[in-house]
Image: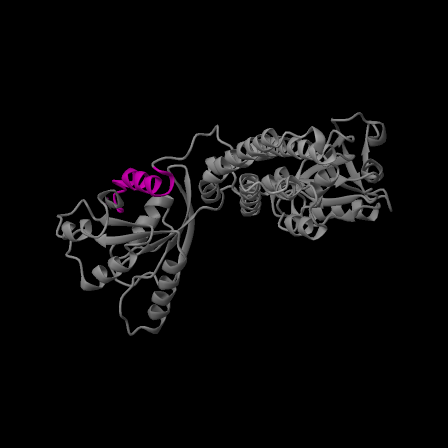
Amino acid sequence: MIEDTIAAIATPLGEGGIAVIRVSGPEAIRVAASAFRSKTKLTDAGTHTVQYGHVIDPANGEKIEEALATVMRAPRSYTAEDVVEISCHGGIVSVKKVLDVLLDAGARLAEPGEFTKRAFLNGRIDLTQAEAVIDLIRSKSDRAFSIALKQADGVLSRKVKTLRHTLVETMAHIEVNIDYPEHDVEELTNAFIRDKCAGVLAEIEELLRTAEQGKLLREGIETAIVGKPNVGKSSLLNSLAQDDRAIVTDIPGTTRDVIEEYVTVGGIPLKLLDTAGIRETSDVVERIGVERSKGAIASADLILFVVNGNEPLSGEEISLLDELADRQTIVIVNKSDLATKIEMEALYERLPAERIVRLSAREGEGLERLEKAIGALFFSGAVESSDLTYVSNVRHIHLLKKAKGSLLEAIDGVAAQMPIDMVQIDVRNAWEHLGEMIGDAVSDSLIDQIFSQFCLGK
């Protein structure tokens, strides 16, 4: 039972049109009513109604803010508790004053993610839906947002619950045969267990098949833009970001550090890292930048290796290209608007043609070819249908793999004619791993860890 009432600012701090302070808990309406004056008392207001009035300081009756108070009575609220949301003018001072009087009236300052945590603890959502909330907030592309929204609506939860139901049926069948062995027909029982486990296994494998795509869509593809100085790396970053994010000059070595920028290319989020040009240099600062560039290359999911199409390949570039040939690398032959002097044959000898893209970063010409090349490299040409249920959370992927392993052991046990009570252990393990996904039999420490990643007020 949750007995205390919490309050927090639910909108970003700073100047804005409005700000929202959220109060939730058994005393939420009383706490808000003690500091809010309107024609209709909040304690008498119906659920899902909005009251116009003023926030006052109960100590002296002084008006603090003009505001709207939205009342949502349990269980029809975000947390499944009584909730009041006070909307006032956006400003650091005004918002702080409103929050202070609510805290003085008996509310406690909420911890990060505590409102969503209460929604989970009160049974309104399960753990996969709760984790989808933070994915909604952090989405960096329309596709990632769409995946998170479907998970928040319970698409993944419902699939997992269906799979668990099938496993429960299987365990019940095993239990009956353990309790009444005289009625057991071993061949039929083994076939039943094998078919049920195989069906759940196929569903899990389908989820895992799209898991890598889901993870990339959720987190973005870490992409290092590398190459010699002055080949157009910063121009490419600016073209993709559609903004003058990096300084572009004709002077080699302008970029001295790694510049980060999130962009969406063909519906795929990229975390772009514009790196310092890789070359031998006596400049101490530039040399540090080159070392950071090499570090970015080592950790990147995708490498965009930019070369100047208007000049021959250098020995340094050929050596770097040989090093990157086994990585997820796309060679960008830049400055396609100028005469071609680069040896294209040397590139085709080292990489497939579909991973070599000609474009002009300065003119923004050819970027659509780059989009197709990235899609082909990571998504077999395109992002999967929006009808699929994506798994994008690392924790979920790990648990699905553990459930898959348990089911394979169960199927192997049936094939080896092991006692069915031994097979049941593996079936139960798979059921429990799936249960951890949605929050059944999950530790308090894990719950705290998950919700600590949320922002204050969510």
Residue 318 located within the stretch drawn in magenta: no
Q: Residue at x 22, y 64 (%)?
A: 316
Is residue 12 at all visible to an observer of this figure? yes
Whether residue 126 is situated above or below residue 395 in the rendered picture: above
Q: Quadrant of the C terminus?
A: top right
Farthest-out residue, front? 182
Residue 28 appears at what percent x and percent y?
80, 38
Q: Quadrant of residue 419?
A: top right
What's the magenta region? 359-380
Q: Nearer the viewer, residue 404 or 457?
A: 404
Q: Residue at x 34, y 66 (%)?
A: 290
Residue 370 located within the stretch drawn in magenta: yes
Q: Nearer the viewer, residue 253 or 3?
A: 3
Residue 429 appears at what percent x and percent y?
63, 44
Q: Quadrant of the N terminus?
A: top right
Which colour scheme appears in the figure? one colour
Residue 147 appears at what percent x and percent y?
51, 35
Q: Nearer the viewer, residue 334 or 175?
A: 175
Is residue 390 at all visible to an observer of this figure? no
**Left or right of 428 on screen, residue 261:** left
Whether residue 405 is situated above or below residue 207 in the rendered picture: below
Farthest-out residue, right? 59
Q: Residue at x 31, y 38 (%)?
A: 372
Residue 101 appears at what percent x and percent y?
80, 46
**How many marks can you see?**
0
